[in-house]
Image (cartoon, grey):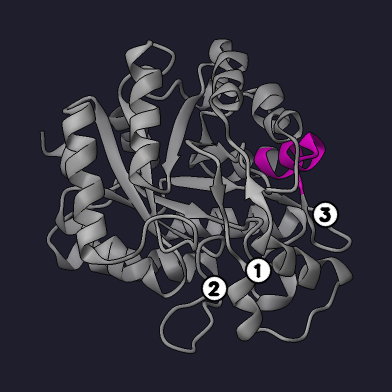
Amino acid sequence: MAEHRKVVITCAITGSIHTPSMSPHLPVTPKQIADAAVAAAEAGAAIVHLHARDPIDGHPTQDPKYFREFAADIKRRSDVVINFTTGGAATMTIEERLQPALQLKPEVASLNMGSMNFGLFPMLKRFQTFKFDWERTYLETSNERIFRNTFKDIEYILTACADNGTRFEIECYDIGHLYTAAHFFERGIVKPPLFIQSVFGILGGIGPHPDDVAHMKRTADRLFGDQYQWSVLGAGRNQLPIASMAAAMGGNLRVGLEDSLWLGPGKLAESNAAQVRAARTIVEAMGLEIATPDEARRILQLKGRAAVAF
């Protein structure tokens, strides 16, 4: 029982939300991503969640060659659990988004539970200068772009990866997404324990108010009982406050530069590891312990690092 009160920290190293120009600390090349992941693990992350970037201009890519390069590097240097995105970016096809998880068979992969508006355009109020042409357009056009995750898309990813033994980080941006997860759970397409990642503070999804956090937890408890592990991520300035709430409520947490570039008001985080250390300080101040990678594997019932294809 005590082991299950250990807090699993996931660190999202780099993603499609933030463009490279927004922070000089965002890792872009495979070497930078691998170095950032290893440092985050050394700081206390049990899981690292990974997107890839084109090393030339930093745009999001799902080319498996980049995932293979940094994942193999991380695996050589750390026993951290490796988690690939199947979300990629909202501009990609579902087939494109799936390829890294399908081909490389990681222990964990993310999976979004619903189509949604995904509004990044408010960032334009804070950032006016961009290094690459694609960055401004990527943010501007998010006011007319739908992040597609239909029932067919979700089932396609789940069934395509069914023989991989990959456990999914089930990302729920709103209450309805929990019910979608329950739909696939009831059909036996996803197996317990479910790893439910509740996402707060993205424009188009549920807000970051404490009532929203409590509502998501109550609903997940009712739908899944003791058949799931709960984790949270808060976008932007909501990252550490929501992490604190989740730890106090018996949950796990996710931090990292994919979700927030910040480490305090007006202060850019200098690394993913810095955000992990901040989260770890909060957890340990509550009298809790962080989970090691192998403890996270037992809690989430993962297949183990020897069963991946990289």
Location of mark 1 (residue): 26
Position of residue 128 relative to residue 163, above or below, is below
User: Which residue type does callout 3 highlight?
Assistant: Asp
Is-magenta flag for residue 209? no
- Give the image quarter of residue 21: bottom right
Mark 3–mark 2 distance (CA, rounded to whole Å): 20 Å
Is-magenta flag for residue 69? yes
User: Which residue type does callout 1 highlight?
Assistant: Leu
Left or right of 241: which side holds 86?
Answer: right
Work out whether mark 3 precedes mark 1 in sequence or the reverse, and give the earlier one: 1
Estimate the x, y position of residue 217 in percent, counting from the top left. Answer: 21, 46
In the picture, the quarter occupied by the C terminus is top right
Position of residue 179 relative to residue 123, above or below, is above
User: Which residue type does callout 2 highlight?
Assistant: Leu
- Give the image quarter of residue 13: bottom right
Majority SS type along the magenta span: helix
Return the residue nearer the eye: 43 or 278.
278
The answer to whether any part of residue 241 appears in the image is yes
| Most distant residue in the front direction | 144
Return the residue nearer the eye: 285 or 142.
142
The structure residue drawn at horizontal position 55% and vertical position 26%, both measured from the top left corner, is: 154
Range drawn in magenta: 61-71
Return the residue nearer the eye: 305 or 213.
213
The structure residue drawn at horizontal position 70% and vertical position 32%, both measured from the top left corner, is: 94
- Secondary structure at badge 3 equals loop
Location of mark 3 (residue): 54
